[in-house]
Amino acid sequence: MAQKILVTGGTGYIGSHTVVELQETGFDVIVVDDLSNSRIKVLDNITKITGTRPAFEKFNLADQIKTLDFLSHHNDISAIIHFAASKAVGESVEIPVKYYRNNLNSLMNLLDGMKNYNIPNIVFSSSCTVYGQPNHLPVTENTPRKDAESPYGNTKRVCEDILNDTITAYPQLKGIALRYFNPIGAHHSALIGELPIGIPGNLIPFITQTAAGIRDELKVFGDDYNTPDGSAIRDYINVVDLAKAHVVAIRRLLEGNNKSGYEIFNLGTGKGLSVLEIVNGFEKVTGVKLNYKIVDRRAGDIEKIWADTTYANNELGWQAIKSLEETLLSAWNWEKNIRNIK
Ligand code: WQD
């Protein structure tokens, strides 16, 4: 009997790619999503890729009654991967209460259910945003967290503390927080990918929409940073490499290989790339000339960050392996597929 994994936010960008990897590894997956920032059609496309349609229930995990009722009827779940959260940095500045209520209550309801119904394992979707602008680079898991640059980032930091404190109080629970750097790209089938609703906040979907003619021009937010070409540096990790890391983390918990009840891993490539390097890389690999303009810095942006991946590589036996070229091409193929561009 295949072990059953609950994936919250499983119709989202990273969630959908993780569902594919879980199914292809032989796990039985059930997805819970409120579809506030994703489409049910993603389940059809996951099914096309893996041949198995994940079970699905639609509700918001911040609803305590629904979440506890769901878990009481699914206490055969071996582990939870918790992606579901509000994640738009800019919006979180405008309506912080929505972000704290949704992101914190969702996690707390899941933890209550895990404790009540003996569901021992959880992998939590965290973010390198908890490091703010690090004083030293690259960033290790021991790099001190800093005051978040946004309410969204602070919800990730507080959720890590909620998880850590709950596991301390209830040692029957085990958890891993995965701190993502910048996830980009799409599944090679071009059937799933990043599908921002409205104007994209993140760099890669804005690039692919500009290349597709949906956006007139890409604005590069600042070229006066203290970096080689003046534009900001990030650690861009292929979303499939990232999804595979979640399967490794789940198996670590299920097989009891975790070294402590609460563990943290950075998920990056270990290489920093600037915005202009990404732009040039996209033009080179796709042959599409991008219309872009350098404008002022975006409020809240940090200058540079990239991961020291040694601990994740050694402890998890996982490494990001897909090249930037393959990753940028996958993002472009996805954009072309959803826009019916040949
Ligand atoms: C990357 C770089 C921008 C758009 C955020 C969250 C993080 C995670 C990923 C959720 C920056 C520049 C961007 C554009 C640009 N989100 N840029 N023009 O801000 O590093 O991280 O998204 O989990 O938690 O903080 O990602 O893709 O928005 O920006 O020049 O139109 O691209 O200034 O330097 P970011 P991003």
Image: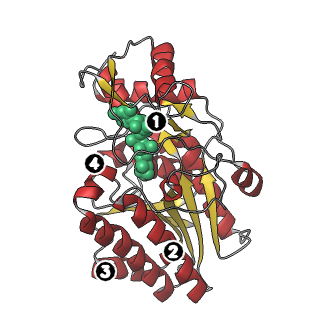
- Callout 2 secondary element: helix
Please tell me which residue is depicted at 33% across the width and 20% down the height of the picture.
292
Q: Is any part of residue 146 visible from this angle?
A: yes
Image height of 166 relative to 199, above or below: below
Amino acid type of disc 2?
Answer: Asp
Front in this rendered view, residue 28 or 285 = 285
Residue corresponding to mark 2: 161
Compare marks 2 and 1 and give the one earlier in the sequence. Answer: 2
Q: Position of residue 136 (x, y in %)?
A: 64, 49
Q: Is residue 317 left or right of residue 330?
A: right
Compare marks 2 and 3 and give the one earlier in the sequence. Answer: 3
Amino acid type of disc 3?
Answer: Gln
Instruction: Mark 4: give few (<14), some (14-19) or many (20+) Cα within 10 Å.
Output: some
Compare marks 4 and 2 and give the one earlier in the sequence. Answer: 4
Please tell me which residue is depicted at 53% across the width and 79% down the height of the picture.
119
The residue mark sitting in front, 4 or 2, is 2
Compare marks 1 and 4 and give the one earlier in the sequence. Answer: 4
- Callout 3 secondary element: helix
Image height of 123 relative to 23, above or below: below
Quarter of the displayed picture in which ligand 1 can be seen: top left
Q: Is residue 317 left or right of residue 67?
A: right
Compare marks 3 and 4 and give the one earlier in the sequence. Answer: 4
Q: What's the mark number on residue 64?
A: 3
Q: Residue furthest right?
A: 314
Front in this rendered view, residue 300 or 280 = 300
In three-dimensional space, the C-alpha distance between marks 2 and 3, rounded to whole angstroms, equals 20 Å
Residue corresponding to mark 1: 186
Residue corresponding to mark 4: 39
Image height of 325 relative to 272, above or below: above
